[in-house]
Amino acid sequence: MAKAPLSVVVTRRLPPAIEARMDELFAVTRPEGDAFTRDEVLARLRDADVLVPTLSDPVDAPMLAASDRLRLVANYGAGVDHIDVATARQRGVLVSNTPGVQTEDTADMTMALILAVIRRMPEGMAKMQQGDWEGWAPEAMLGGRLRGRKLGILGMGRIGQAVARRASAFGMEVSYHNRRRLHSGIEDPLGATYLESLDRMVAQSDVLSVNCPHTPATFHLMNARRLRLMKPTAVIVNTSRGEVIDENALTRMLRGGDLAGAGLDVYERGRGVNPRLRALPNVVLTPHIASATREARHEMGERVIVNMQTFADGHRPPDQVVPAML
């Protein structure tokens, strides 16, 4: 007798090719519109073996307790700070993610934000769109040169390393702070210098790139005290998680001229971006699109399918997440 396919609840619509492949392999329930509400997920979860959420869908203890049948949370994305991994483990629910898929795209976006802030690209674009350009002039719209600037990378995982490779090609001097120093076989080709003291790295950096995950240990790692260590000519870029930076403190420093600029793709309160931050001309804001390429979204879906199929075959998902990894 053939084994029944896994019953899967997908919280949001995914790329059509991914949905079609999931339908071939599993018994899938997905929204007709863009996304299920939390109550709609809870109602369908009682009969599900697998939940496929995204970073916009909190999978907390009450949601995990809503089903005795649930055995796998196959996250569509690398970050899992929206999932209560410890409670899932206590309930015998495995958690998987999609690491590495977004690395190159996020690193591209980091460099794009660095260039946009230092070369004042949004200000220039606004002048062109508003018809305010008065023509070329020696002192008009002066930005800065990347070559020779000191880039500090906070978090030297896959994405941090990809940022270092790009920055080195631009002639930037790269240093990094990490929980652990990289092996010389990784560090040396990157031309990156390890600094055990985060305060020291922050103080010497012309550009600070935040590339670490959000965990209890990294919440407000860039707090008011540490932000004040930065040079007034420095800029900060964040394509990781908004909670790593104290956004109110950052806004005050930018408004007061204590920092030269910021490029942000993520925000401490999700969509609730500080309106004072939006009003600043030296700040470039993008709507959490660092991994928003067609290639990444498709590859994320493929990894989710591999994790689910491996689980269906009686094995642990290759991208299983455990609390010790966080």
Image (cartoon, grey):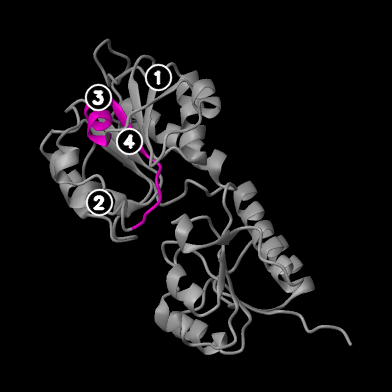
Return the disc, 2 or 1, that comes first in the chain's sequence: 1
Which of the two marks, 3 or 4, is nearer to us in this view? 3
The residue carrying mark 2 is 220
146 and 213: which one is in front?
A: 213
> In the image, is 158 to the left or to the right of 3?
left
- How far separated are the C-alphas under marks 2 and 4? 32 Å
Q: Are marks 2 and 3 in contact (CB under 8 Å)?
A: no
296 and 189: which one is in front?
A: 189
Residue 126: which disc?
A: 4
- How far separated are the C-alphas under marks 1 and 4? 28 Å
Residue 134: percent from the left, percent from the top? Answer: 28, 21
Which of the two marks, 2 or 1, is nearer to us in this view? 2
> In the image, is 213 to the left or to the right of 184?
left
- Dot 3 falls on a residue whose secondary structure is helix
Q: In the rendered image, which quarter is residue 39 located in?
A: bottom left
Return the disc, 1 or 3, that comes first in the chain's sequence: 1
Q: Answer above or below: position of 83 versus 132.
A: below
- Dot 4 falls on a residue whose secondary structure is helix
- Dot 2 falls on a residue whose secondary structure is loop
Which of the two marks, 1 or 4, is nearer to us in this view? 1
Q: Residues within 10 Å of mark 4 (few under 14, many from 20)?
A: few
- How far separated are the C-alphas under marks 2 and 3? 20 Å
Residue lying at 19% horizontally and 33% vertically, measured from the top left = 259
The residues colored magenta run: 198-215
Q: In the rendered image, which quarter is residue 5 located in?
A: bottom right
Residue most toward the left? 256
The residue carrying mark 3 is 204
Which of the two marks, 1 or 3, is nearer to us in this view? 3
